[in-house]
Image (cartoon, grey):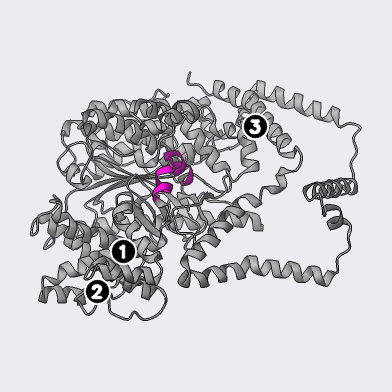
Amino acid sequence: MATSAGRAVRPEKLGLALSGGGFRASLFHLGVLRRMAELDILRDVEVLSTVSGGSIVGALYVLFLKKQIDTRGNLTRTHYLDIVDQVQTTMIKGIQLNLRLRLFMNPLGLLRVLLTEHTLGRRMSRLYERYLYGEPVRLLDLDPAYASRTKWWRPGYIPLRDVWFTPEGHGVRGIYKYNAGNSSKLPNLVLNATSLNSGQSFRFSAAEIGDSRLGLFRWDEIETELNPRKRLLELPNSTFDKEASASPNSPLYDYARWWRELRLGTKPRRPAPCRLSVLPGPFPGAELGALRRAKIAAWYLLRGITQEMLVRGSNEYAGWLERFWNAVRRIDSPFADTLLDATRREPNDLDVLLECVLQIYYLRSAQAMSPRLRMDYQDLALSEAVGASACFPPMFPPFVVLGVYDDAHVSRLALTDGGAFDNVGTATLLEEDCNYIIASDTGALLEVEERAAGGRISLAARVPGILMERIGNLQNEELEYKNALAALGTSGDGLYGLAYFHIESPAVAGSGCTTGLDRKVLGRIRTDMDAFGDVEIAALVNHGYDVADRHIRAKLGNSPFVRNRSLWTAPASLPMSLPAPPGAREQRILRVGHARFFRALKLGILTSWLFVATLAVGVGYAARDSQLSIGELATAVADQVTDWIEYLVPVVGARLIHTPVPILWAIVVVGTTAWIAIWGWDSLIDHLRGTYPAIARRLAFAAKWTRSYVVNLVWLVGLVPVWIALAIAATAWTAYVFLNLPFLRNTRIR
């Protein structure tokens, strides 16, 4: 147990953060996982927080781990090493299939992207299913309801909800209690994306989804806590009053009535239904993420006792009580002091306070949730959560989710790469109260430029890099600060152990393997989803292994997770075969690895150069007598658009095209339409949200689905999308054969 002077005992809780960075990150993390398995510390991870490329490999690891734990329960060190072997084999095989090119090689998949709301990000998530998660999912005992879909239609499909552990086939009642009594911990996999609606981290896990501003929802509370309150909040006043009169002195109805009145923007006719006069205080308007921390502690202190998860007065009870007060102080420190004084004068009021926090949190969550939340959650695939976490711009447009939240609250949820908010994932570990953290960061340091470009485009590319590096530095400083406070015994929620390293971390003094790799060169390797050659794979895996080994042994060598001191010595060899130091050929391959395109040409591969030369000669010969003017091109485009409009609107299409329209009338129509689309519609929904929430939801629901399809209506004309899909697929296949395959053959380890 970790303690600090004068504070409650806190059980050790190890969190592992795997950062983003495409397949470069995935390969680096493979080395980290292997070394943690060898040190026998991988079994102690209770929270696995992942971003982008870290989410891809993290989800794969949890799927293989689930099979073993569901079968055996507690595992040995050998089992964890076998799991990492499976992850490494599957990951490398999938990477070398070049998923980025395969994204464009299927014309039917491209046609779906062009004609429907199915985006490239969702298309990529299907590739993760088929080529990465297919093998571990096939090994699992799947629910018969979707087993046939997994076998034939979507190999690798598994709902996010089912990525939950059932040790030896038995369900777990309280993950905290299970982890406290077993050597193989059940890691809570949290896949981090970024919400463009709120600017916060959006978290996917088998137990909970959401973000700290819009709302977070636990699966096991949807039916028991949220749906009943959602129904009460949506009832007409007469129906609600009739039901409430039939259940006098019911906290559920009393709090619901108070919240209904508060939601209308008027002063409730009666105070919050609790004895403490200072309540509800700032709780109704507090950020949901901060209120969630208080709610979790309140649940264990109030409901955990009745379910025999806690014993009042125990050290564990004192620990949860300290977490509760720390969470309330984050919301409002002076108010927390007032509440603390009140509960000291009257100890029985503590339960009243805890119940008030629970009721307000559940009411706010019920108001924010979609009535179809349970169905939306149940249908959400693991690969879709990974796809949202790895939906890095500008390659992928936002990952749109038409669900989870009430349409009158959030009608269109747009997610992007988790690295936009936190590229390492440590914020989630702190939210989950981890007091030991291992953070694997594959983000390279910002490169120094001898001559800074002065153009606007280069400036737009450079500034985000500066901001991201600054944010990363601040996050690292926060972790170091918490670690220092814990060492001094002045913080009850500090870090008792921290091993933070990144791909360019300087070597830690002490014994270790000699790789001879240039960390700056590895830090410049592309962060992409294309194929990596054997040399690149071995270099990244070995480097991740070596960096993790040195930092974990140096920073956590005295932690409670050291079971066998003989394992915590320098390893005898690296996990993958690669000359140390690399020869001239290997160094050249690694230096070229920064290029996203045409690496085969930069390596001087003859097959690729012959193809490019032949293609250039063929194009030149075919176009030798062709001529095209800008005027002819503009005329052809205008004629084609005119034909499309006449075809699309057969009755009035010709009149719409050829009838003159008064300019003033056109300005009024366009301006009015723009005003309704930009301001008027939102104002209408905002007005209805408070007074007629059901109507507001139906209007927002209709607008949401109309918008998701209307942008694609133009593609319903003619065979243009078919030809576009075929052309892109043909180009992708050509690149795969003449550029990708020669690159893989010529980057094998000799």
- The image shows residue 607 at horizontal and vertical percentages of 66, 21
What is the distance, in whole Å, between disc 3 and disc 1 at their CAs? 47 Å
Residue 381 among those drawn in magenta: yes
Q: Residue at x 30, y 33 (%)?
A: 66
Q: Are marks 1 and 2 in contact (CB under 8 Å)?
A: no
Residue type at the position of mark 1: Tyr
Look at the numbered discs 3 and 1 and tell me whether their residues touch, using CB distance below 8 Å.
no
**Residue furthest out toward the left:** 313
Dot 1, crowdedness within 10 Å: few (<14), some or many (≥20)? many
Q: Amino acid at mark 3?
A: Pro
**Residue range corresponding to the magenta coloring:** 374-388
Residue at 61%, 54% (x, y): give it.
706
Q: Secondary structure at mark 3?
A: helix
- The residue closer to the viewer here, 652 or 147, is 652
Q: Residue at x 34, y 79 (%)?
A: 268
SS under mark 2: loop
Work out how far the residue at label 1 is from the one at label 2, CA to CA, in angstroms. Answer: 14 Å
Q: Position of residue 129 (x, y in %)?
A: 46, 33
Residue where numbered disc 3 is placed: 107
Task: Name the front one of labels 3 and 1.
Answer: 1
Which residue type does callout 2 highlight? Answer: Pro
> Gap between marks 2 and 3, in whole Å?
61 Å
Q: Earlier in the sequence, mark 1 or mark 2?
A: 2
